[in-house]
Image (cartoon, grey):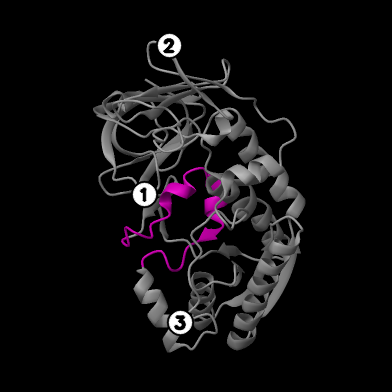
Amino acid sequence: MKIAVAMSGGVDSAVTAALLKEEGHEIIGITARFLPYNDINDQIYKANVNDAKAIAEKLGFKHIEVDLVDDFYQNVISPFCSEYLRGKTPNPCIICNRYMKFGKLLDIAKNMNCHLIATGHYAIKKNNNERFYISASPDVKRDQSYFLYMISQEQLRYTIFPIGSYSKNEIREIAIQKNIPVKNKPDSQEICFIPDNDYISFIEKNTSNLPPQGQIVDISGKIIGHHNGIYRYTIGQRRGMGISSPVPLYVKEIDPEKNRIIASTKEELNVFGLETANAFDMKMIISGKIKAKIKCRSTQSPFYGTIERHNDRFLVQFDEPQSGISPGQSAVFYDEGNDVLGGGVIEKTF
């Protein structure tokens, strides 16, 4: 079988390619240039693509490069900045997976007559004779199922995750055993287009019309301070408020219409439910009410709640109050077997 492997130059995609090659498949490694052109990004991309080429040469398969810089900016970077300016906390990796890795890159693979595209995600693909779906990796710390809930049935049909059932330690061991060139390469934890993790500076450099300064108010509406732009704050944030108070204050809500930050005590951060801006189904078409486990951040321990579909949105009621949940993040639903049922981008909390 002819399989395209999305290669970042890291150990996960390298082992993905190695395992498939060992199974006898014809492999084509593809490294996509997503990052905008500048000196820092050029250096990052050059290092990664050189690693990918070294892997392909070592394992004996073809490798190509594709330029998706404009598509990435339009589909990922621009919406990321826009959402922050609206007081939301977006997750660009989820959008990238849907529109870039399993969108544009999958199209390229099909155009090369590849039967499938493979990635180094820690997630397991399954099917129940009716639908394809994703299940969480047994390596809880590495599980990436949260980032994949937006992938369509058509995209999943042509996608495989060869290392999904492995742990990170096992992948490292395989890389060492096979003497893969990047066997000791460290993992990248930051958002790829913000390598220094400085969101604020990135947004300021890539946005011409920044929100002005505004008021910080308490939950009764009393003015207690001023902020330097709502994009500088996230729900649950404590530091950087610049407010003198006898008790610690946190960002409870961001109101873009009134350009203000609502601050509260830690106890007042709790929310009891949420509404999503859209609705994605994976293992099942969610209709009526269902009980499920819910994650609103990739690293969050799942909690229980009731999900109800309202046309193209989900209403979610939590069994117990939760804190630190921000509009712009995604609510992803799991069953008891850790299979992804569906999810949506959080529009508002209650």
| Cα distance between the residues tagged 1 and 3 | 26 Å
Q: Nearer the viewer, mark 1 or mark 3?
A: 1
Q: Amino acid at mark 2?
A: Gly
Q: Which residue is mark 2?
A: 221
**Labels 1 and 3: the sequence-earlier one:** 3
Residue at the (63%, 45%) spot, across then down:
201
Q: Is residue 40 left or right of residue 273?
A: right
Report helix, strand or loop for mark 3. Answer: helix
Q: Which residue is mark 3?
A: 175
Span highlighted in magenta in the image = 138-165
Residue 299 marker: 1
Question: Horizontal and vertical percent for residue 163?
Answer: 43, 68
Question: Horizontal and vertical percent for residue 332?
Answer: 40, 39
State yes or no: residue 147 in magenta. Answer: yes
**Nearest the camera: 326 or 250?**
250
Q: Amino acid at mark 1?
A: Thr
Quadrant of the image containing the C terminus: top left
Q: Amino acid at mark 3?
A: Ala
Tell me if I can see residue 84 in this picture: yes
Q: Nearer the viewer, mark 3 or mark 2?
A: 2
Count neighbours of disc 2 (C-alpha within 10 A) and say few if under 14, some if 14 to 19, many if 20 or more. few
Residue at the (48%, 59%) spot, across then down:
189
Report helix, strand or loop for mark 1. Answer: loop
Report helix, strand or loop for mark 2. Answer: loop
**Labels 1 and 2: the sequence-earlier one:** 2
